[in-house]
Amino acid sequence: MKLARSIMSARFCGVLVLLAVFVCGVNTSRAAVNQELSDIFNELWRLDLNRMKPGVDYTISVQGRASFVNQRSHVAPDHASQPLFSNVNMNKLKNTTTYSRFMKLLDNYERSIGMIERVTVEERTENNLFLDAILETDVMKRAHKYLVSKGQSSSELRLFKRQLNLIWFNIYHRQRNTGLDSCGFEHVFVGETKSGTEVIGFHNWIQFYLQEKAQHLDYKGYKAMQHDIPDQDDHVLSLQFSWHGAVKPAGSAFIGTSPEFEMALFTIVFLMSKERSTTVPVNIDQCQVELVVFRHGHSLGTAYPKLLSSNGRHVRQLVE
């Protein structure tokens, strides 16, 4: 009997050791940030003068932790009785060129995938004006310079603009056996629905705020690890919400950042890797983030930030 208990105990300890090795491996991989990209992204962060300041230009209320919801569910318990955004500086949105031109693009698309996207002359002009605006910012100028130094972009601004247009605005097939129905910009910044039951994409805080304000979107609560409660000044959040009757069980987005900053980050990740799917762990300001990018040929399929820790929590954990 004692021998049997000893064998069982040894086996149990062995399992614990394997689990410990596995957990340590996960933590190690999460801590292995890409330092070069972290450096350039922090430089872009400092250059992002159009970024909104929490508590000054906007106020959010994260409220309760969202429940688990199955994909394609029409119903999600509401753990946030109030909107996520209680206040946003609309004057800054309307009077900052990149924001104002960005917002003009948000109504240019069919919400449901499978519906053919027909780009009008007016919409093409709006795309060009938006690209012109972001190319004039210090953020995109620095991103362009970095990509040129890596041999990923031409030094000619005209050709770089064409490259951005191909990555973000080229219309392609997202759903099989349909016409040209999607593009990177629509998927990431505007959002789409699939079969009327599922929200896909939709990783932008400005679109979130505008749709919430128009009462097309209902914030259900934040998503996070059990012991991790987001702060109101976190620059990346994972959210659950419903949009036009469809539910997004979990979707993440930068909060307060400018369109040029987000496009610069995801463009760099897209061009620096030829893999269909790329995940890059980086430190940006006080956040440890995984930037996730999927390719769709020469264009962007999707891109979003995945928060690992915020407000220096990962730094404090290393010290502790």
Image: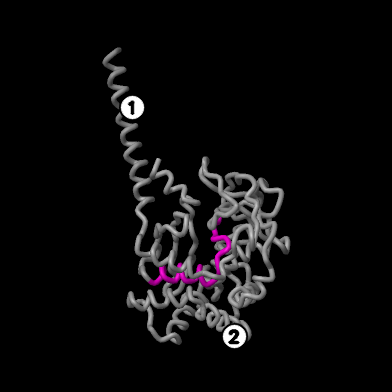
**Is residue 187 found inside the magenta-colored segment of the image?**
no
Assign a secondary structure to mark 1: helix
Q: Is residue 75 left or right of residue 49?
A: right
Question: Taking the image as drawn, is residue 176 in sight?
Answer: no
Q: Which residue is under mark 1?
A: 12
Q: Amino acid at mark 1?
A: Phe
Q: Which residue is under mark 2?
A: 125
Q: Position of residue 7 (x, y in %)?
A: 28, 21
Number of residues whose C-alpha sits closer than 10 Å to that of mark 1, classed few (under 14), some (14–19) or many (20 or more) = few
* Residue mark closest to the camera, 1 vs 2: 2
Quarter of the image holding residue 150? Answer: bottom left
Q: Which residue lies at the image location 56% right of the left edge and 73% below the top edge?
A: 181
Q: Quadrant of the C terminus?
A: top left
Q: Which mark is residue 193?
A: none
> Where are the magenta residues, as a range?
251-271
Q: CA distance from mark 1 to mark 2?
A: 66 Å
Q: Residue furthest top?
A: 1
Q: Quadrant of the N terminus?
A: top left
Q: Is residue 179 left or right of residue 38?
A: right
Viewer-closest of 317 and 281: 317
Q: Which residue lies at the image location 35% right of the left edge and 53% below the top edge?
A: 32
